[in-house]
Amino acid sequence: MIPFNIKQLETFLLVATFGSFRKAAERLNTTQPAVSTRIASLEGALGAKLFERQSSTVRLTAEGQRLLPPAQRVLRVAEQLQLTANSLSETAGVLRLGVAETIVHTWLPDFLKELQANYPLVDTDIVVDTTTTLRNELMSHRLDLAVLMGPILEYSIENMELPSFPLVWVCSPALKLPNRGKLTLNDLMQFPIISYARTTRPYSELYRKLTGELEATPRIFPANSLAASIKMTLNGIGIASLPREVVQDHTANGTLRIVDCEWHPSDLRFTASYSSEPSNPIAERAAKLAGCIAHAYAARIGEAQPANNSRVEPAASQPTDAIGR
């Protein structure tokens, strides 16, 4: 029997995943003829045809389908042996990281510092975009790890749950809101509502709530950029639903004030998601590190928050246009 090697099995799995010799070659940083040679050698060793070549793609034959599960198991064992042999500091490669903007404004700097300290030979390419785009990029294998509003319910995707971000209503102190306690949605509807982009879960929840319970058509200003939402809110354009941690500096220095409302959207729930097929040890390690950093950040911020930070208490001389508590 002609012997075969781990590199040939790895190439086989990548071609099967991408459905393309060219894309597998790009991932392996080699040439398409080299990939073709590896597959041909593996087919010769096994005495079976593994792929059907078509015009622009390839697909597994019946023999290729049967080889897929044992090949995946062999590579997992090989990766574990490699991890045992190598110290963490020797891990090298490129991590293609996608993050939602909320993460940029919170614990991403801490994560990048720890990633560099623990894996100095790993280079990081960072993409900041919406969850919809990050999901598509991850599913297309153009990202290794995505921190997004998950989970991604696909069999090939591993999701590590991260601490959530509570959303609070905030506005500029210049807005004249009713001078009473907890405000209603009708009170808020007197102003434009600044929200996440139309394709996001927070926007969908907010739109359903406002259109389902109120007769008036809501004026919602969706924004793809969290920084733009904050800027519009600071300028008094409207009332925004934003992560508490993202606006904490503004609420602390008085440039934004928290609005106490009877309803607010659900917390933002994030996951560190990565593909398990093909296996990517760097992405898996980075996801676990992201989990540690995110939980440490949440604990640190939680200790700094007052007992009830969703309520703004009026001063004794508060004017009549004060925000509701």
Image: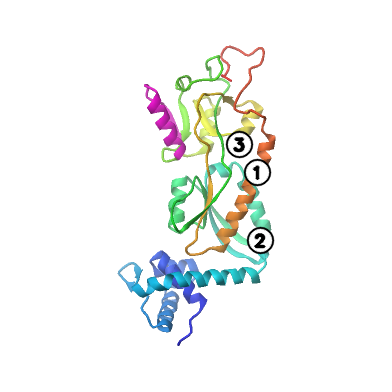
Measure how far apart labels 2 and 3 are at the Cα level: 29 Å
Label 1 neighbourhood size at 10 Å, few (<14), some (14-19), many (20+)?
A: some
User: What residue is pinned by disc 1?
Assistant: 297
N-term-proximal mark, 1 vs 3? 3
Label 3 amino acid? Glu
Instruction: Residue 121: give x, y in percent of width and height.
Output: 64, 63
Label 2 amino acid? Pro
Instruction: Residue 11: give x, y in percent of width and height.
Output: 46, 72
N-term-proximal mark, 2 vs 3? 2
Q: Residue at x 49, y 32 (%)?
A: 265
Report whether residue 54 is seen.
Answer: yes
Placement of 140 over or under 203, stated as above or below: below
Give, as a single range, the part of the protein colored magenta.
201-223
Q: Quarter of the image containing the N terminus? A: bottom left
Label 1 amino acid? Tyr
Instruction: Tell how many labels.
Output: 3
User: What residue is pinned by disc 2?
Assistant: 120
Q: Secondary structure at mark 1?
A: helix
* Residue nearest the observer in this picture, 82 or 119: 82
Label 2 neighbourhood size at 10 Å, few (<14), some (14-19), many (20+)?
A: some
Q: Residue at x 47, y 46 (%)?
A: 131
Dot in front, 2 or 1: 1
